[in-house]
Image (cartoon, coloured by chain):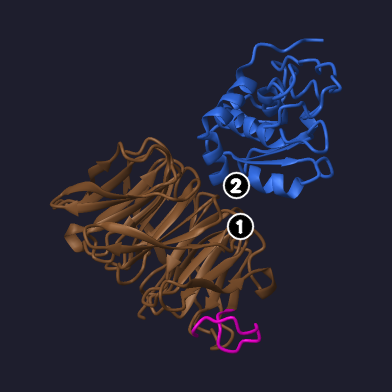
Chain colours: A blue, B brown
Amino acid sequence: MTLGMINAHPVVHAKKERVARSEDLHSDDALDALDVFDSVRDIKDPEHPYSLEQLSVLSEESIAVDEKLGRIKITFTPTVKHCSMATVIGLCLRVKLIQSFPPHFKVDINVSPGSLADEEAVNKLLNDKERVCAALENPSLRQLVDECLYSNELYSL
Amino acid sequence: MELLDGELELREIQKLEGHTDRVWSLAWNPAATGVAGMLASCSGDKTVRIWQKGPSGSWNCSSVLEDTHTRTVRSCAWSPSGKLLATASFDGTTAVWEHVGGEFECVATLEGHENEVKSVSWNASGSLLATCARDKTVWIWEAQPGNEFECVSVLQGHTQDVKMVQWHPFLDILVSVGYDNSVKVWTEDGDDDWHCVLTLGEANSGHTSTVWALSFNSAGDRMVTCSDDLTLKIWDTSQNPSETSGDGNGSWSHLCTLSGYHDRTIFSVHWSREGLIASGAADDAIRLFTESKDSLVDQPSYKMLVKKEKAHDMDVNSVQWNMKEPRLLASASDDGTIKIWELSVVSK
């Protein structure tokens, strides 16, 4: 981990208004992009006390769900092009999704095209199950991930 | 090879439960046969379990090898005599266990890799052990009297994480595959001088993403590799491997690519004694392939015989045929279970 911040002045956005879903027309059991977004929108950025949603790292539109096939695809946009925290964000997403959704769902996590200098390398790493498992067995990395997932320090706008 | 006449299927014999985390790898004991069948499995729960077929015909967990590895146990391999079991772990070590009268004792711990060890393999005579790790190296260890192991070579060449090592079924030729998308072949020049004699990369019709596993057929003249690029590749390994230029003269070469059958990463592949290739993939399915009848000598073709969907509830990490009972297949999954299957003819 680098000592200085990659991006000391992130652009922070307002959170999207939360829509009450009781009057949703499709069946309660079907999983959709908003369900997935709701589970990850409040994950804290590893470097700043803001959520991934507030920093526009991801949005509902960056998530695709195929319920029949059991696939979730998330694309996220790191705040800066040379972001060493991209892999940490990716790990946070993976852990949160494993915790939130049935195990038969297959999850693909990628950075949005053009958003990162070494995007191919980062995408390959984030989707290598063995590398992800080994990384999460690293105590300090796991601690950082847990801080992002369970943080109560989010500032609201 | 006499293949069963009729439509084939994989019939589930038993589901083995006990591990408390994903099961990564399996190995059948080559010496234990028939009624005394024995299977080793290793897991993210840091243990290795030994399963044995009891007199009633059902499989039970007879031993749990624990309190040795401090992280995921990723791979396990029996020595050809069946007396020793090597286990490779994310903790950076490879343990060697001796099987004496129903008990297992850790008799050696091989240290040296800088980080997670991914795979371990014994050569045909049991005199050499190979390991590989995320540190991009392949290590060769020589077995010495008194269960001592000496590192005789540290092989550099891969540019990324090495996923698996496997020895040729009867020659002292080692193959390694990995995250750099390549397949590397290593031989010895006499006196512990090991080096890479061949690299099968994208330029030689090789894989275009991480290569996860490899398996030789029983004759040692064919090898199959599987990859994150969603293909299986069959290689001609009948010639002595050498660095002669890839124009087909006397070296290993690409024969055939099986594509369009898998839509998620293929983690494991294993060639049975009867010529069937089993694959285990991230879509929870097991597939079986065989060389098709209209295969030509210089243009072999393969076809899929069986697709077992939802073989497990999650990714299939390992498939292993039993070498003595070639219709018996074991599979291991992220769902924490192991399944024993029997290849049989569909009853009409």
Out of B139 and B132, give the one closest to the viewer.
Answer: B139
The magenta span reads: B239-253
Relative to B242, does residue A75 appear above or below in the rendering? Answer: above
Q: Is residue B69 magenta?
A: no
Tag 2, which chain? A
> CA gap, disc 1 to disc 2?
9 Å
Query: Which kind of residue does numbered mark 1 sit on?
Result: Thr
Out of B295 and A93, give the one closest to the viewer.
Answer: A93
Query: Which residue, given by chain and number where applicable, does mark 2 sit on?
Result: A128
Query: How would you classify the magenta stretch by its main secondary structure?
Result: loop
Relative to B72, does residue B201 appear above or below in the rendering? Answer: below
Query: Which residue, given by chain and number where applicable, does mark 1 sit on?
Result: B210
Task: Answer left or right for A44 relative to B19.
Answer: right
Task: Kindly identify the residue that appears in the image at 75 percent across and 24 percent down.
Answer: A52
Secondary structure of the residue carrying tag 2 is loop
Q: Do we see residue A70 in this rendering? A: yes
Tag 1, which chain? B
Task: Kindly identify the residue that appears in the image at 42 percent across and 73 percent down.
Answer: B168
Secondary structure of the residue carrying tag 1 is loop
Check contact, mark 1 vs mark 2: CB within 8 A.
Answer: yes
Q: Do we see residue B267 in this rendering? A: no
